[in-house]
């Protein structure tokens, strides 16, 4: 794999994570539990779409602009998306969405923080900006998880259920493939597994404050970065790509 | 008819750009926000403006690009080039005291530095009400009408207000 191809794939991985999670959060629009949260969820979505756009634009530039950022974002099939499995999972209830947000935002904040030192200037520049945004996402979801965990019996039950359901998708975020090998060699990325200990400690700290227990099962599902997905991604793409499939080439 | 060459100066370009207001906060300009990083006047009536994005998903960025181009073209610049620079990342530390004061006059509480506490959960911040200056205020939501603002409430004048987040 050439360095250029590795960078391209890496940009897609980051952008796809942002876009798919952003799309999931956008599904909350007008359905938030309270007005402030409705605004918060769509604000988080907007951050993610903004970050996705920046990385899709970089991908388009790496590919000599043979496709636009929009083409790359919308005109691939599910096996060509490299997002993590956790971001494509359905929203469930508010507790479930917050748990998904926490597990991902904690990871993303650590990832962007390390990528701010990438030898690739565009990756480091975009990451330095994204890390500030992920800090808000992390705080927002962490505070909710603690509130829900310490709330009523019902809220605690719901948030524990979310953790039990979503934990199996977390190892998937620390997977690596040839893309990573090439980028590590070039000093543009790093061994993603190095993030695990810190991530585990940070989410573990939130869970103990929320009196939640991490499930003990070993039943991990992986494959996102290699284009192997759960059935949910296909359904999201159906919705997102409908217009371009029905009216190919349609523009504003 | 011979077209008279217009010699625009860098100073003039800065002045023009200072007229481009933030669509969400019309009292401050993109220059005051620190979004314009560099201006370069080149032969052939060309101007290159280097800007930096504020928030990744800020919809106002698209408006800025359009506005910069039109204000310069209306003032005789033929070629406007826009360059985006990512590093150093934009920060609210670049807002001057004068700009912060303008925000306050407009009814938006200016950013209060939170060095060190950005990662603290349930952190209590001291944000004075832009209307009555009371510190008897509370956070309603970390997220507001735009990515740069949070929602606050003043318990003295009993009015909601917006706070420009530290970034």
Image (cartoon, coloured by chain):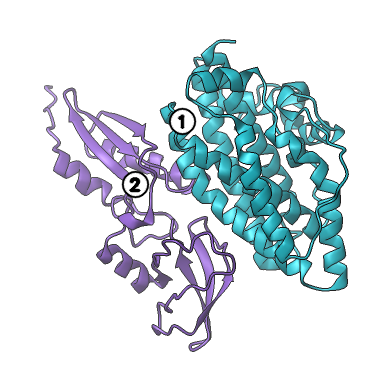
Classify A221 as above or below A179: below
Measure the C-alpha gap from mark 2 to mark 1.
Answer: 24 Å
Q: Chain B is which colour?
A: purple
Quadrant location of the C terminus of chain B in the rendered image? bottom left
* Image location (x, y in percent) of residue A221: 83, 34
Q: Residue at x 72, y 21 (%)?
A: A80
Chain to which mark 2 belongs: B
Quarter of the image holding residue A247?
top right
Q: Which residue is mark 2?
A: B35
| Name of the residue lying farthest toward the bottom | B156
Indicate the chain on which mark 1 is placed.
A
Q: Secondary structure at mark 1?
A: loop
Crowding near pointer 1: few (<14 within 10 Å), some, many (20+)?
many
Q: Residue at x 27, y 65 (%)?
A: B97
Label 1 sits on residue: A118
The structure residue drawn at horizontal position 52% and vertical position 82%, both measured from the top left corner, is B159
Residue A240 seen anywhere in this rendered image of the structure: yes
């Amino acid at each position: 794999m050439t360095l250029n191809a590795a960078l391209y794939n890496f940009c897609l991985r980051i952008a796809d994570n942002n876009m798919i999670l952003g799309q999931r959060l956008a599904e909350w629009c007008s359905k938030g539990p309270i007005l402030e949260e409705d605004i918060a969820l769509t604000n988080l979505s907007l951050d993610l779409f903004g970050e996705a756009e920046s990385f899709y634009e970089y991908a388009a530039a790496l590919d000599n602009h043979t496709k636009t950022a929009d083409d790359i974002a919308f005109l691939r099939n599910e096996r060509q998306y490299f997002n993590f499995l956790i971001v494509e999972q359905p929203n469930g209830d508010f507790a479930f969405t917050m748990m998904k947000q926490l597990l991902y935002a904690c990871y993303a904040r650590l990832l962007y923080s390390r990528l701010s030192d990438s030898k690739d200037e565009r990756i480091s520049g975009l990451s330095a900006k994204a890390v500030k945004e992920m800090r808000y996402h992390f705080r927002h979801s962490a505070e909710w998880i603690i509130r829900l965990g310490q709330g009523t019996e019902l809220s605690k039950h719901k948030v524990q259920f979310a953790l039990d359901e979503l934990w199996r998708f977390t190892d998937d975020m620390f997977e690596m493939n040839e893309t990573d090998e090439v980028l590590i060699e070039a000093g543009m990325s790093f061994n993603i597994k190095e993030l695990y200990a810190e991530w585990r400690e940070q989410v573990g700290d939130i869970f103990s404050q929320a009196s939640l227990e991490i499930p003990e099962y070993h039943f991990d599902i992986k494959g996102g970065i290699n284009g192997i997905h759960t059935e949910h991604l296909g359904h999201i793409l159906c919705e997102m790509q409908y217009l371009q499939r029905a009216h190919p080439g349609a523009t504003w | 008819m011979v077209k008279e060459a217009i010699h625009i100066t860098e100073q003039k370009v800065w002045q023009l750009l200072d007229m481009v207001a933030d669509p969400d906060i019309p009292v401050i300009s993109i220059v005051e926000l620190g979004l314009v990083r560099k201006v370069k006047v080149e032969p052939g009536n060309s101007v290159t403006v280097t800007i930096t994005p504020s928030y990744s998903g800020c919809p106002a960025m698209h408006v800025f690009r359009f506005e910069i181009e039109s204000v310069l073209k209306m003032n005789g610049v033929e070629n406007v080039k826009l360059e985006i620079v990512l590093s150093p990342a934009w920060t609210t530390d670049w807002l001057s005291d004068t700009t912060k004061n303008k925000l306050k006059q407009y009814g938006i509480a200016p950013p209060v530095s939170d060095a060190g506490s950005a990662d603290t959960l349930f952190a209590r911040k001291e944000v004075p009400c832009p209307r009555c200056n009371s510190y008897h205020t509370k956070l309603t939501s970390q997220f507001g009408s735009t990515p740069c603002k949070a929602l606050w409430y003043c318990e003295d004048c009993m009015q909601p207000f917006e706070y420009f987040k530290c970034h």
